[in-house]
Image: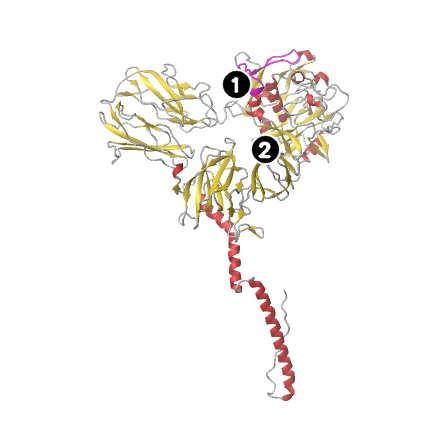
């Protein structure tokens, strides 16, 4: 509104007073001035009245605005609100020096996986859901479907199109266009004071979080209103894939704790490891939540302990109550550990006294990271009675009550076999394999002399007791200071076990049991399987599956279907392309060092890092960074809009030279999409290793199917005969059309390869940047491969070292083409529609320049 601003005429005062001739003129001027002033005043009153917005005065309105701005939980002109920043800074002061993630329900401080996505429709009993856009949605992520008072947790299994996705479970009700796919159903608290209010049944779910990958408990702190409502917290990760509830362990409130009136901070201890997710549900009655904070370790900020979460008071198991003839350095032990919260064990504290009341303490162990403790020499006297008690502490910092006191009486003289100690594995060690070697300290004696006659080794579950160990070696005279745990005793899955040992002297008898050593097994014991070239020639060679010790290994389909690497080979849709994901694996290859197959070429894979194994080069990205997976096209490449694609029902893209194939693959990397390229020889080598181990040989036409190799032209990429050449969902691995392969070239008589499984740059005609000279001779004659270059084999690449002109003398069932041409010669793979018996998974053509284009030459898409 523009205020009126009519002029006010100044009235001069230099005229003679009371002059009749001036009266009319001055009256008119004064009257006009008053009219102008009245008009200004009316306009100002109207403007002020509007600005008051119903408040009694303008000051009250301004104060209300200040209050609103100060409490905004969102953004102001694109900036985070003052309260959001203030809260974030304050929380950083509270929980600094830990990996931390904030959910402040304000822009820039969110943990939900997505903003609201409008639903188009969802039908009960169907797994698909139509939305306005699938952009930004992720496979494997949980979301909430919200419509009215209905809230449902769903997980995305596959992005089908830009507006349709497939869920992991069928919908239980119809969802209309009024529904939203979102990360929470909680609503902002009215009045702009920040935070959200959850009604009973409301929920919130996080995006993927990483708070650490060790065995330390994580902390989730929820600032919530103090009332009878329950905020139920759940988590899941790779080790605990099902949503698992955790109950709060500590509660803080009051000004000293930095918590406003009417609220409390509930701290939940969550054993989440690696990447994981959080979820909350509201139960009982509505609850206000101001923030959710996740940290990489417990805060240590204290608070009221949830009585239901404290560990149970332990029981002294050694020495037994009333025991006699106890040596100078007995091993004090408690009978297991139990936590209602499911928190892991952290420490035990032992005390020794001469009185059952513990009015005075003779010795205090302090916090010991084990459930047993060897008493040092010099504390106990001979022929005396002592009392011992203990309490335990969990990883959340919650402490049990003291155990009941237990008594024992010492020997009349101290001559004994020293209590041994386990030196390997170390206490608290994780990722223990199935058959570790346990090593003890050397045999020793105090107060006399003796010889080491035997030893005894025991293993129990951390949650069990020594009265029922899971394994007892019995008295052994051979494994006296080291012992290999037999197969089948330890179980994977980060299972905690406790170890102990005792030594026996020929004269003085048994020592005390060693202090307990707690170990944690691998989540999954490495599953190793390989293939050895037992004999060359015969057309396809002779191959035998082997284990890590190069001994023959019997497998079946179930073995590979349950192997983590093979089970992880799955189809996924990325940018609308049908791709096959291959998870990272470890390999070892070369020649067998000794035994039955000494000197024979072999390769083997492991799903876990194992000594002597390396990450396959297919999973080494730029700068040597490991990749968790790669993707290769499910189908031979076709093209649409100048981009290579992997879709069914079309003819393959052919008649393009190598730079064009590269360019059309790179062309997919737009609008936030990245990583697409032409498939590489590393990708192919990974497939070759995995497929040959599973199939037990290299002649895939004999083991899987011929493929389209006896025709006169190319067919659709999913034609029935093309699909005969399919392994683990990858269709047309040989036959139909040659498939150009990046990352390997022959230059004269030498092989060159990419340093990493990514191009050195995206200049499509650059065949130098990113390549390294292997120094290995490349054959310049064609033939049927007989043996492999074991140096390159040990680097993860399978190329022939020798060939024979007669197919029946070969060892792969496939052919190799080369020539004496100098200059860059790029790689084609698999053979085309007329290749006949020469085609296969190991058919390699290295005698064409990058400029070659032909109707029989295509490619395949890949992604990192």
**What label does residue 169 carry, if any?**
2
Residue 101 in the image: state x and y as whole percent. Answer: 50, 42
Farthest right residue?
712
Q: Is residue 190 left or right of residue 800?
A: left
Residue 620 in the image: state x and y as whole percent. Answer: 58, 29
Query: In the image, what residue occupies the spot 50% across and 36% down?
Result: 235
For disc 1, the marked residue is: 548
Q: Earlier in the sequence, mark 2 or mark 1?
A: 2
Mark yes or no: residue 395 visible: yes
Disc 1 secondary structure class: loop
Mark yes or no: residue 756 visible: no
Question: Which sits in the foreground, 819 or 509?
Answer: 509
Residue stretch rendered in magenta on the structure: 533-559
| Residues packed near mark 2 inside 10 Å, few (<14), some (14 to 19) or many (20 plus) | some
Picture quadrant of residue 787: top right
**248, above or below 514, in the image:** below
Residue 176 in the image: state x and y as whole percent. Answer: 63, 42
């Amino acid at each position: 509104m523009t205020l009126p601003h009519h002029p006010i005429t100044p009235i001069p005062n230099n005229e003679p007073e009371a002059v009749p001739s001036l009266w009319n003129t001055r009256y008119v001027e004064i009257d006009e001035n008053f009219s102008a002033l009245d008009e200004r005043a009316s306009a100002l009153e109207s403007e002020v009245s509007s600005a008051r917005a119903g408040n009694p005065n303008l000051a009250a309105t301004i104060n209300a605005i200040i209050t609103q701005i100060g409490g905004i939980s969102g953004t102001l002109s694109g900036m985070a609100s003052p309260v959001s920043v203030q809260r974030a800074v304050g929380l950083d002061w509270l929980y600094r020096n830990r990996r931390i993630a904030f959910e402040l329900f304000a822009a820039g401080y969110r943990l939900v996986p997505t903003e609201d996505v409008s639903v188009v429709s969802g039908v009960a009993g169907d797994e698909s859901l139509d939305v306005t856009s699938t952009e930004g949605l992720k496979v494997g992520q949980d979301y909430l479907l919200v419509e009215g008072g209905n809230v449902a947790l769903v997980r995305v299994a596959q992005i089908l199109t830009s507006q349709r996705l497939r869920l992991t479970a069928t919908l239980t009700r119809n969802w209309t266009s009024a529904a939203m796919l979102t990360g929470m159903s909680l609503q902002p608290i009215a009045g702009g004071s920040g935070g959200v209010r959850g009604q009973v049944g409301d929920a919130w779910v996080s995006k993927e979080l990483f708070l650490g990958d060790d065995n330390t408990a994580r902390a989730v702190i929820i600032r919530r209103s103090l009332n009878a409502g329950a905020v139920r917290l759940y988590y899941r990760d790779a080790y605990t894939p099902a949503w698992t509830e955790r109950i709060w362990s500590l509660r803080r409130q009051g000004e000293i704790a930095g918590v406003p009136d009417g609220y409390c901070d509930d701290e939940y201890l969550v054993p989440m490891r690696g990447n994981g997710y959080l979820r909350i549900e509201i139960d009982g009655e509505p609850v206000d939540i101001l923030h959710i904070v996740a940290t990489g370790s417990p805060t240590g900020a204290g608070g009221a302990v949830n009585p239901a979460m404290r560990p149970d008071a332990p029981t002294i198991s050694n020495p037994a109550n009333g025991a006699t003839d106890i040596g100078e350095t007995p091993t004090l032990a408690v009978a297991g550990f139990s936590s209602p919260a499911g928190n892991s064990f952290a420490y035990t504290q032992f005390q020794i006294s001469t009185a059952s009341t513990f009015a005075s303490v003779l010795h205090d162990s302090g916090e010991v990271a084990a459930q047993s403790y060897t008493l040092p020499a010099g504390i106990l006297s001979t022929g005396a009675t002592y009392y011992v008690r203990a309490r335990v502490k969990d990883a959340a910092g919650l402490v049990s009550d003291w155990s009941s006191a237990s008594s024992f009486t010492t020997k009349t003289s101290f001559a004994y076999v020293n209590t041994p100690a386990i030196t390997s594995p170390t206490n608290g060690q994780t990722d223990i394999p199935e058959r570790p070697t346990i090593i003890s300290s050397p045999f020793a004696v105090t107060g006399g002399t003796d010889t080491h006659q035997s030893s005894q080794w025991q293993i129990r579950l951390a949650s069990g007791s020594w009265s029922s160990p899971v394994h007892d070696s019995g008295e052994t005279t051979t494994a006296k200071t080291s012992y290999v745990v037999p197969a089948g005793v330890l179980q994977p899955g980060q299972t905690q076990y406790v170890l102990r040992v005792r030594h026996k002297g020929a004269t003085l008898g048994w020592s005390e049991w060693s202090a307990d050593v707690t170990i944690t097994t691998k989540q999954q014991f490495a599953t190793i399987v390989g293939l050895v070239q037992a004999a060359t020639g015969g057309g396809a060679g002779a191959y035998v599956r082997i284990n890590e010790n190069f001994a023959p290994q019997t497998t079946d389909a179930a073995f590979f279907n349950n192997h983590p690497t093979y089970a992880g080979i799955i189809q996924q849709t990325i940018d609308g392309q049908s791709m096959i994901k291959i998870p990272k694996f470890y390999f070892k290859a070369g020649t067998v060092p000794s035994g039955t197959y000494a000197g024979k070429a072999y390769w083997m894979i492991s799903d876990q890092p194992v000594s002597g194994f390396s990450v396959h080069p297919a999973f080494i990205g730029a700068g040597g960074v490991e990749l968790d997976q790669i993707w290769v096209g499910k189908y031979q490449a076709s093209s649409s809009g100048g981009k290579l694609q992997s879709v069914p029902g079309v003819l393959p893209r052919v008649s393009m030279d190598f730079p064009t194939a590269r360019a059309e693959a790179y062309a997919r990397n737009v609008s936030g999409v990245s990583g697409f390229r032409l498939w590489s020889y590393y990708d192919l080598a990974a497939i070759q290793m995995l497929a040959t181990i599973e199939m037990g040989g290299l002649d895939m036409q004999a083991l899987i199917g011929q493929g389209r190799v006896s025709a006169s032209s190319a067919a659709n990429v999913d034609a029935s005969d093309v699909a005969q050449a399919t392994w683990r969902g990858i269709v047309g691995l040989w036959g139909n059309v040659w498939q150009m392969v990046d990352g390997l070239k022959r230059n004269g008589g030498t092989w060159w390869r990419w340093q990493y499984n990514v191009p050195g740059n995206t200049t499509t005609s650059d065949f130098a940047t990113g390549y390294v000279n292997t120094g290995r001779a490349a054959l310049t004659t064609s033939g049927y491969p007989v043996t492999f270059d074991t140096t390159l084999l040990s680097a993860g690449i399978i190329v022939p070292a020798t060939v024979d002109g007669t197919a029946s003398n070969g060892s792969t069932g496939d052919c190799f083409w080369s020539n004496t041409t100098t200059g860059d010669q790029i790689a084609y793979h698999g053979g085309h529609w007329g290749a006949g018996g020469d085609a296969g998974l190991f058919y390699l053509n290295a005698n064409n320049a990058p400029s070659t284009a032909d109707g029989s030459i295509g490619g395949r898409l890949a992604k990192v």
